[in-house]
Structures are given as structure tokens and as C-alpha cells.
Amino acid sequence: MGHSGSGKSTLLNLLGCLDRASSGLYRLDGVDVASMSRRSLAHFRARRLGFVFQSFQLLPRLTARANVELPLQYHGGIGWRERRRRADEALARVGLADKLDRRPTELSGGQQQRVAIARALVNRPALLLADEPTGNLDTGTGLEILALLQELHRAGLTIVLVTHEPDIAACTHKTVQLRDGRVHKLEERQAPTDARAALEAWRAEEARLEAAGAA
């Protein structure tokens, strides 16, 4: 977290091996990435990192399955049957097993973000980087995505998430506040907000307000 210009994007780019640090040491999954060539780094990034963006970044002409298969094109020796199996598995994991052949324009915003998450998971990454993944979503859909990310974290996936929203940060185990490119504050939580419970509470409140309006 942090204001515009605090260094969030720079830090995310460094963690995602999109930029190289001018000093210091960064080991990703035990590997010193600074010593790798550009080609080796791109190959390593494709295999060990997953990216989720605020604007989904899906190709509109491709189906959900085809969008998810894209990162596997960078893997040598993976045939189309295995690519399809992994893509279908990733989409089922995010609750879209029945949307395999839908194009982005045929999906809701929340479903498009789930496709983007499936695409990030298809390479079985060591680290998932999420840049404001709920920024373009309404409250309920945003909570659905947060609940999914919490489930993935409980299953063992490390996630770094950028957000401006304190309510979203409250769903995480640790918050790093940045200021002027430096860590300003570090907060750890023993009991983060349960996004699934928050979603159910939100739905109940929406139903109550709708019933009150109808009366």
C-alpha cells in the first residue's frame, strides 16, 4: 500500500523480474535473478511467476480456455493436449469449468478476472503478483475475488497484492506501507478478515435493503 509515487509499481516490477535492481540482492525461489541473462530471466519468469492485473488483459478474440493456455506456449515440450488439460484444470479451480469456450465479452467483470487468475495459475507459479485485482469490480464481485485469493493462499500459494483500499488490506496477513520508495510501516495480522464471510454479510445486507425498498 501507499500513495501514488510511493514505489508500489517499482517494487512489483522488481519482484516480477520485469526490472532489475540497481543494488542489493533478490533471490526468487532460491535463485539469484540478478545473475541471469535476459533470455534466461524471461524463461524463469514465465515458469515461476503469475501476474494478475486490474484491467484483466485478456485477448478478446480468444476463448477463456485459449487465454489461459497462452503462458504454456513458452514451455518447451508441452503438447496441445497437455496445455488444454492444464487450462481446463486452472479454470475449474477458479470456478469456471462451465465457461471454457466463452470469450471475454461474454463474461462478467468478475468472471474475466477469474480467467486472468486461472491464466496466472496455469504455470503453477511460486509467486502470484496481483496489481489492484479488484480495482475495476463492484463490492460484491471484489469480495468474491478476494475470497478466491484467500483460498489459493491457504492452499500454499504466496501472493503479493497491491491495493489502495484498507478493507482489502485487512484481508491479508501482512501489509507493507511504502513511502518515497522505502518501507514506512509493516503490519502483521493474526486473524485477517475472512473475505467469504464478508461477502455473505454484504449479500445479506443487500437483500435486506432490497426488501426494505420493496416494502
Image: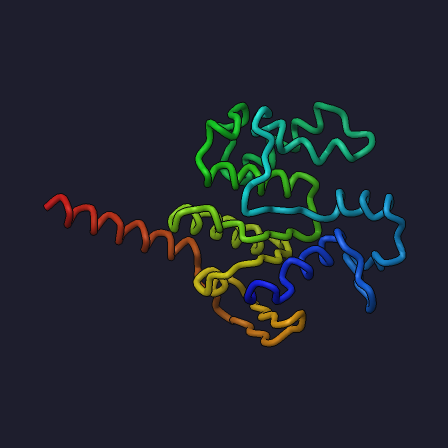
Residue at 48% x, 28% y: name it. Answer: 105
Residue at 56% x, 55% y: name it. Answer: 154
Left or right of residue 62: residue 102: left
Q: Position of residue 144 (x, y in %)?
A: 44, 47
Q: In the orientation shown, which residue stands out farthest toward the front?
A: 5
Q: Nearer the viewer, residue 94 or 4?
A: 4
Q: Name the quadrant of the N terminus.
A: bottom right
Q: Position of residue 92 (x, y in %)?
A: 54, 35
Left or right of residue 201: residue 28: right
* 164 lies above or below 56: below
Residue at 37% x, 52% y: name it. Answer: 199
Residue 9 picture quarter = bottom right
Q: Nearer the viewer, residue 44 or 53?
A: 53
* 39 lies above or below 13: above
Q: How many marks?
A: 0
Left or right of residue 119: residue 202: left
Q: Position of residue 58 (x, y in %)?
A: 59, 35
Q: How is the image coloured?
A: rainbow
Q: Position of residue 146 (x, y in %)?
A: 48, 52
Q: In the orientation shown, which residue stands out farthest toward the bottom?
A: 185
Residue at 58% x, 70% y: name it. Answer: 177
